[in-house]
Image: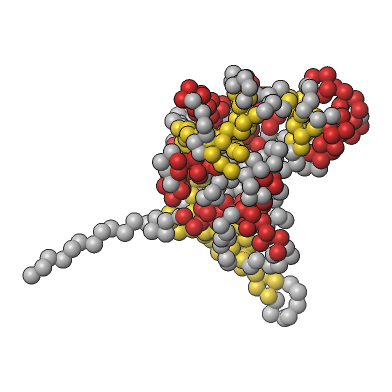
Amino acid sequence: MTARKTPEPQTKRLRVAVLYGGRSGEHEVSLASAAAVLANLDRKKYEPVGVRLEKDGRWILADRLPSASSAAEVIEQSRLDAGRSRGGREVLLPPRPASDTLLVLNRQSDSTGGDNTGVSLTGLGVDVVFPVLHGPFGEDGTIQGLLELANVAYVGCGVLASAVGMDKLVMKTVFRASGLNVPDWVPVDRHTWQANEAGCAAQIEQNLAYPLFVKPANLGSSLGISKAANRAELLAAVAHAAEFDRRIVVERAVPNAREIECAVLGNGEPEASIAGEILPSREFYDYEAKYIDAGSQLEIPAVLDAPMMREIQQQAVQAFRAIDGAGLARVDFLLNRATGELFLNEINTMPGFTTISMYSKLWQASGKDYPVLVDRLIALAMERHSDKQSHRVSASV
């Protein structure tokens, strides 16, 4: 008689709420990143829940999860779908701890045939949130603050690191205070600029030599960025950046620069990937070069000697620690070809996260495939959340 094999115990799947979209110019890029995350969540380990954040701020429990092979594809599809309903019920994330992390709004038509509707709520518990959101209201500490109030585990950096990583002016100040080399810059306030453009431009020219890069302080994906070689171009560049933010960064361009990027992963003991290089199809790596024009190329690993590769990895980790990073970040550098001087450009606390994005490709080249990376990020989120639960919340002994 053959002995029966004891069945293996069933492990409860973690319910993962993937947040995507958002109220920013990087809405479409977020959809592409979320599509990759959702496609690579192991269904034996995780139960995915897609939550789409519309541009008007509503949270929608998605009927249809995003799927796209590239950011360019999802951006084009988004343009075609403009104005069309994508379906799904509205959900809320109450700012307090509860077993029902999300509340689903069920709207019922008035039985009299009138316009009034009734609303009932259904609770939906979530184990961990994966906020695949780029830009303001997603990567800047705002959504992280809400998740902290709800006391739910979430992937990525906390409130402070997210806010500092989004604000280029604060970021540069923190990095320079930490001993990291950043290009010289001048801050510009939109109100002051509009009141006295000529005076502000003259002050910039007293402190920085052309060419200059002009950037909104709080935006990613190279949106709103221009290069200026003279006064006329500076005036146009600042006016363009001011359409996106009230605070603007004008910084000295690194001459003949190579664009080098390095990925960081971890909490208390972060590790750095090998570095890669962007070979942009345009003069610099702007939004079109990143997501629309297929001519840009990635070189992984970057052609660097061993000491420079180590220096970039060490500075990437140093930058991550300087802002109190957690989970993940991509750190971008500028390397002067002629002098070999290395400059830290910026840190991205929720970088583009498709399977062909630089962050995931750097880790793939470093030995961590995309599904492994997603697993690790969720584990880091649970680990960090568990650690925070041990904090005292009362002064009494």
Q: Position of residue 229 (x, y in %)?
A: 81, 30
Q: Quadrant of residue 298?
A: top right
Q: Position of residue 23 (x, y in %)?
A: 70, 50
Front residue of this view, candidates 293 and 83: 293
Residue drawn at (71%, 38%) of the image: 283
Front residue of this view, candidates 76 and 146: 76
- Please give the count of numbered marks on the rendered protein: 0
Image colouring: secondary structure
Residue 123, compared with residue 179, is above or below; it is below
Residue 267, compared with residue 122, is above or below; it is above
Q: Is residue 380 visible?
A: no
Image quadrant where one finds the N terminus: bottom left
Q: Residue furthest left?
A: 1
Q: Quadrant of residue 216?
A: top right
Image quadrant where one finds the C terminus: top left
Front residue of this view, candidates 147 and 311: 311
Q: Residue furthest bottom?
A: 112
Residue drawn at (43%, 38%) of the image: 366
Q: Is residue 176 visible?
A: yes
Residue drawn at (63%, 67%) of the image: 87
Q: Position of residue 297 (x, y in %)?
A: 59, 43
Front residue of this view, candidates 167 and 259: 259
Residue drawn at (79%, 25%) of the image: 210
Residue 337, compared with residue 328, is above or below; it is above
